[in-house]
Image (tube, rainbow, N blue to C red):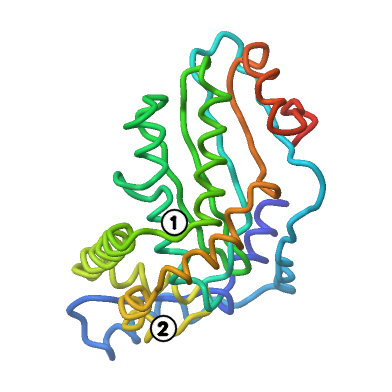
Amino acid sequence: ELLASEAARRLRPDRALLLVAGDVEPGAALAAAGEAFGGWRAEGQPPPPVPAPVATAGPRRIVVLDRPGSVQTEFLVGNLGIARTDADAYALEIATTVYGGSFTSRLVQNLREEKGYTYSPGAGASWLSGCGTVRSFAAVRTEVTGAALNEVLYEMERMATTEPTDEELERAFRREAGALAIALQTAAGVADELARLWVLDLPPGEVGRIVPGLAAVTKGDIRRVSRRVFGTGSARIVAVGDAAAIREELGTFGEVVDGAAGA
């Protein structure tokens, strides 16, 4: 009963978007939509807007989830990002790709190619309706947990204090622009992109502004947005592994708490 009432409160027509993409006749599509959804009515008050999160002050905290005997540590380093409507949104897309969003990124080259700590490290930025997140992730051998985390924090700080090379900038742009072009080749891809923009409070015309916006990003733009989202002091770190083997060295980077206390 509780689940049904909560679903009715949240899944409502005034909070929904219907997208139809493909070889369809608009009038017929509207008629079919009206027949299917015409009787749908909102019930009760909608949930209140979720307030934008605020970065908390204080020492860096590392939450450890114990997995006794594990031969690997899986960790995630997270920071608050920015809204998709922010003027630095395109710069963040490029910055994240330079940092850890592709095989040739700094994080992958460092942790995989140079150090051999892990096979598939990476990073990504998520866009949410209020404020997104920027995350770095890796699964590393238990004995190099501290060394790997040190390199992640180093690469984050390097993003915030140095500009990318011409090659890094061009390579990141080509990857992002190419991925969008591929995604928009199908009707499903177009619908997915338009739905994503709607959730993020952007108009359909934003699709045509993405590639020019990415192309206009400068090295200075990347360094500026990196200072906003790659600050290691406010990072939140979660590590899943053998707590007895990794707790002491993780303590080098901040206050270590167990998973139950850090939840």
- Crowd rating for badge 1 (residues with CA inside 10 Å; few <14, some 14–19, many 20+): many
Horizontally, residue 213 falls left or right of residue 71, namely left
Residue drawn at 68 percent across, 58 percent down: 6
Query: Could you tell me the amino acid type at mark 1?
Result: Thr
Residue 129 screen position, x and y as percent:
58, 69
Closer mark to the observer between disc 2 and disc 1? 1
Q: Is there a contact, CB below 8 Å, between mark 2 and mark 1?
A: no
Image-quadrant location for residue 209: bottom left
Q: Quadrant of residue 224?
A: bottom right
Q: CA distance from mark 2 to mark 1?
A: 42 Å
Identify the residue under disc 2.
34
Horizontal and vertical percent for residue 118? 40, 27
| Residue visible at 51% across and 50% down in the picture | 158
Residue at x 34%, y 79% (from the top left corner): 207
Q: Position of residue 219 (x, y in %)?
A: 42, 68
Q: Which mark is residue 213?
A: none
Instruction: Give the number of callouts.
Output: 2
Instruction: Identify which residue, 162 or 183, lies in the foreground.
Output: 162
As rendered, which of 21 and 124 lies closer to the eye? 124
Of all residues shown, which one is farthest toward the bottom? 27
Q: Is residue 260 above or below residue 236?
A: above
| Residue 174 appears left or right of 61 | left
What amino acid does circle 2 point to?
Gly
Q: Which element is circle 2 on? A: helix
Above or below 244: residue 193? below
**Dot 2 alpha-carbon crowd within 10 angstroms: few under 14, some 14 to 19, many 20 or more:** few
On residue 96, the disc is 1
**Nearer-N-terminus badge (2/1):** 2
